[in-house]
Amino acid sequence: MLPPFDPWHTAMTAFDVASSSKAGPADLARMRAQRLVVLLEAARRAPMFEALIGARDPATIHLQDLPITNKAMLMANFAGWVTDPELKLDEMCRFVADPTRIGEAYLGRYLLWESSGSTGGSGLFVQDARSLAVYDALEAIRRPVPRPFEPWLQPWRWLDERTAFVVATNGHFASTLSVERLRQLNPLLARTLCCVPFLQPLAQLSAQLMGIAPQILATYPSVAVMLAEEQLDGRLELHLREVWTGGETLTDAMRATIAHAFHCDVVNNYGASEFMSLASECAHHQLHLNSDWAILEPVDDKGLPVPPGVMSATTLLTNLANHVQPIIRYDLGDRVTVHADPCTCGSHLPVIEVHGRSGDLIRLPGAQAGEDTRVSGLALSTVLETVEALSDFQLIQHAPDRLELRTELSGPGTGKMLRQARSVLETYLRSQGAADVHIACHSNCPSLRSRNGKVQRVMAMP
């Protein structure tokens, strides 16, 4: 049985996405408002939202009047969250526990995506043909094309262009399922798209990639940096046209390392299990929110909106494409800054900066007896990112006064870079009132990852 796919709806959605890519602010606002009304009408089929919306006309409901939701809350009331009563959580959990069913349609009409447990525990997200059509169109049409005329000048190369997705393949994750779905729907793509498990020894991963010889590499930024180091050290030889990154924050230092190693364009995007294609990068390396299909509300720690140009404490997502599992004012956990001014590329889709997941809170002994010093993971990441060439790292707290700074980087200059990082970190911690903290540094050391392959930059002690 083929995975969920609606040809007519996919074609109409693709036309809509293409025509609205250059829409003005007023038209984008109108589309959002119309789609929100349709979403709220559909959401009333779910017991949870039926109780919230009641008999009110959805057109009269202000989004900010609805409560904030989160993963833990919704998963605890899964039966009340979904609009299809045939979706049973216990059966779905058994389904996704079977890796042999990756790519198979649940109940013949849904894809089930697992999410990591990095924010609010693990989650299951249901996608039907209509929501998948939106993600397909956004991915295909709003991804920048660095060389737009190349497919026409050399069509034989384009038809044989191989793309390797270096991702977590050990679960029903959005990236893996999306690739498998495309392979099943299009026989031509079945021989040019492949998923490569990154949870394998680096030498084996490099050998497998060289055997595939892809022109496009798609992976997490930290994995791309790791492979870039292998390329620079001569242990990997890939001839890439593009590197696609997502799933983690891509810093300028990481982009520079990847581009330098592979001599190619680096294209970043922003998505989540809750909405696969939230933002796409333009040719100016600016992330543009797909605001015709997703509403993001940057809010402070009290859930109140923050103005443009101010980094949020977290971000609330409303997914206008998914009517089966309504995601409304859902706390993503990401810190986002929305730019006040439009991008010089000409698009009126809002420009956003994503600051990644808010990291663990670190508690350290204070300078005064009996006191402790609390430091946010985001602050520690920001301090470490000031160290030149420290393009990937992980800071782990093993004891109240013992931290470990590890990096997968190696080679000449790594030791000096780590000594500088330790000095910068010690200075900052002292400025925050922390007592003497021992910081051990290790290079050529794999990062600890969640099951879906994401790296949490700062991890507190258990």
Image (spheres, rainbow, N blue to C red):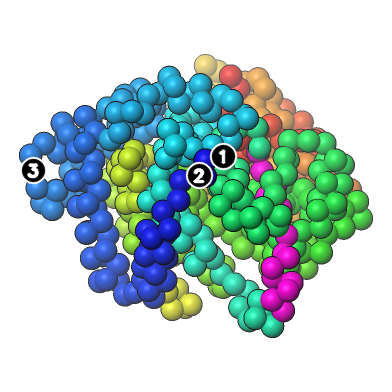
Mark 2 = which residue?
Answer: 3
> Which of the labelled discs sits on residue 56, or is there none?
3
Mark toward the viewer: 3 or 1:
1
Q: Would residue 412 appear left or right of 11 to someone viewing this image?
A: right
Q: Residue at x 35, y 46 (%)?
A: 322
Q: Earlier in the sequence, mark 1 or mark 2?
A: 2
Between circles 2 and 3, the one closer to the viewer is 2
Say the numbered circle drawn on residue 103.
1
Q: Is residue 211 visible?
A: yes
The answer to whether residue 17 is visible is no
Q: Which of the two discs, 3 and 1, labels the residue nearer the N terminus?
A: 3
Q: Front-most of 252 and 317? A: 317
| Cα gap from disc 3 to disc 1, whole angstroms | 39 Å
What segment is highlighted magenta in the picture? 154-168
Residue at the (65%, 20%) spot, across then down = 399
Q: CA distance from mark 2 to mark 3?
A: 36 Å
Q: CA distance from mark 1 to mark 2?
A: 7 Å
Identify the disc placed on residue 134. none
- The residue closer to the viewer here, 353 or 231, is 231
Q: For the residue marked with disc 3, what is the amino acid?
A: Arg
Q: Cβ–Cβ below 8 Å for labels 1 and 2?
A: yes
User: Considering the numbered disc 2 on the image, is that residue within a helix, a strand or a loop?
Assistant: loop
Answer with mark 2 or mark 3, whichever residue precedes in sequence: 2
Q: How far across and how far down the image is residue 161, in percent? A: 72, 64
- Horizontal and vertical percent for residue 350? 39, 65
Query: How dense is the environment of label 2, judged by Cα within 10 Å: few (below 14), some, or many (20 and up)?
Result: many
